[in-house]
Every structure is written in structure tokens, then in C-alpha cells.
Amino acid sequence: MMMGLQVRVPDPICEEATTSDIATLTVATGGEQVMVRCRSENGTGSRRVVCGGAMVAVLCAMLPSTVAQAQVWADVACSESPLAATEGLHCRASEPYHPGGGSRATYRFYTAATTTAAGASFLYLMEGLDEQSWIRFSVALPEQLSQSIPLARGGRNWSAVRLNAGSGYALFTAEDGASCVGFRKPGPDRGAGHAWAILGIRCAQKGETLSDTDIVDAIDAARMKERAR
């Protein structure tokens, strides 16, 4: 591997492969992809990556959970959220986010959550606001959910990831013992990723389990509103 290699990654989410400080990243160099084992040193909006014997400067956005914490969030009427079927939920939205580092992309994040006698639900929408802004998945589903959604933190007994109509999902047990499903739903293709993506969690009432119908319904309900063309 070349010394002093500089790699620019315009993607909104440059995610680590694990939650530790050791990450495996795939970087594009001269049209080829190189898998490197790295130690990351995070900065504001960028990551400096040291890869055993080589220095790779990866310029990218922060992790979604880190980005979310860095943004100014506000409660919004669910009717103003681009998430569909959010009536009765608590909805929030971030301010627009610009990664910088030469990227012209712009993103915005939205959440919708509720806890009732029937269980808990949480949706987290990541949206690119123009054609130069896209979302790319580069971390395992359980790890991304744990980084991004409080209901998944402390989760255990994760199942293998399964597919439902293009969305990946996995079953797990929440920290409080509730039976849950977590999923990741991609939007339409754009650039090197997707125009948007929705992360979601649906947990049953404690002591009960989710049926196959519950799981499919939760994934199907996580979608964007139709927008006027």
C-alpha cells in the first residue's frame, strides 16, 4: 500500500465496521477498491485513518449517531415530517447538515417515536436533500441500529439478518427484555447509494413476542410520504 495516500469519500456516512476503534474500511484508489485495517481518529466532520504502515486521510461525514448529536434538533408536527404514518408519534427534525470537506451534499435527519401499552416504535430517517446527496450502507445492521437508535443500545441475542422486500431486518432482545425487530429500509438508488434510508425498531409489550405479521407491518409502515412533483 502506498504511503501518504489521500482518499476523498463524499458519502454522508463513513461508518466504522465495528463499534471499537478498529475499523475495516474499503477505499477507492484509481478505480480499484482496497480493503484496509485501520485505527480511526475522529475530528469534526472528518476522520483521519491510520492503516498499519500507511496513512490514509479519509474525508467524510461523521457517524449518523454522532451527526445526530451534533445537530440542533426540534420537535415538529408529524404532519410536517416526510415520514408517513406518523400520527400519534413524537416527531423531531434536525437542521440541514453539510459535511464540508469539499462535498456539496446536504442532509437532514428525522425521528418518530412512541411508547404505548402495545410496545415501542422508533423510526430514524436519513435523507439526502439533492441529487448530490446520498446514503450508503457500510456497516452491519445491528451495529448501525445500536449506534443510531436508543432502543437498540444494549440489545442482545441478535438473529441473522433476513430480507423482506429489499429491507434487511434482525430480531433481538432489548436491554429491558422486550422482544424487538430492527430493520434498515433503503430508498431509491441515487449516486453510489440511496436517496434516503429509514432505520426502525419495533418492540412488543414486555413478555410478548412479535408475530411475522407484526414484523412485516412495521417494515411496510416505514416509508416516505408521496411528494408533489
Image (tube, rainbow, N blue to C red):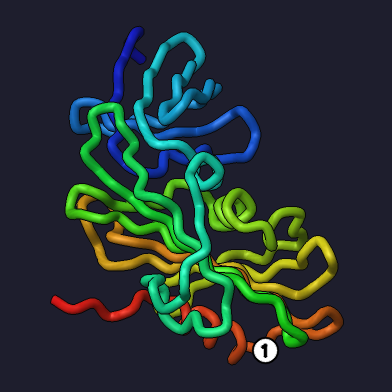
Relative height, residue 175 to residue 8 (above, below): below
Image coordinates of residue 142 in percent, x first then y, are: 61, 56
Question: Mark 1: which amino acid?
Answer: Ser
Judge by depth and name the residue closer to the eye, 29 or 58.
Answer: 58
How many C-alpha atoms fall within 10 Å of the one at disc 1: few (<14), some, or many (≥20)?
few
Judge by depth and name the residue closer to the eye, 147 or 161.
Answer: 147
Q: Which residue is mark 1?
A: 211
**What quarter of the picture does the C terminus occupy?**
bottom left
Image coordinates of residue 180 in percent, x first then y, are: 70, 73
Secondary element type, mark 1: loop
Q: Residue at x 45, y 20 (%)?
A: 48
**What quarter of the picture does the N terminus occupy?**
top left
Q: Residue at x 36, y 33 (%)?
A: 60
Q: Residue furthest bottom?
A: 213
Image coordinates of residue 191 in percent, x first then y, are: 20, 52
Q: Residue at x 71, y 54 (%)?
A: 153
Q: Would you say 155 lies left or right of 10 here?
A: right
Relative height, residue 223 to residue 45 (above, below): below
Q: Residue at x 19, y 32 (%)?
A: 31
Relative height, residue 116 to residue 138 (above, below): below
Q: Would you say 51 lies left or right of 6 here?
A: right
Q: Would you say 82 lies left or right of 47 here?
A: left
Quarter of the image for residue 227 reads: bottom left
Judge by depth and name the residue closer to the eye, 229 or 170.
Answer: 229
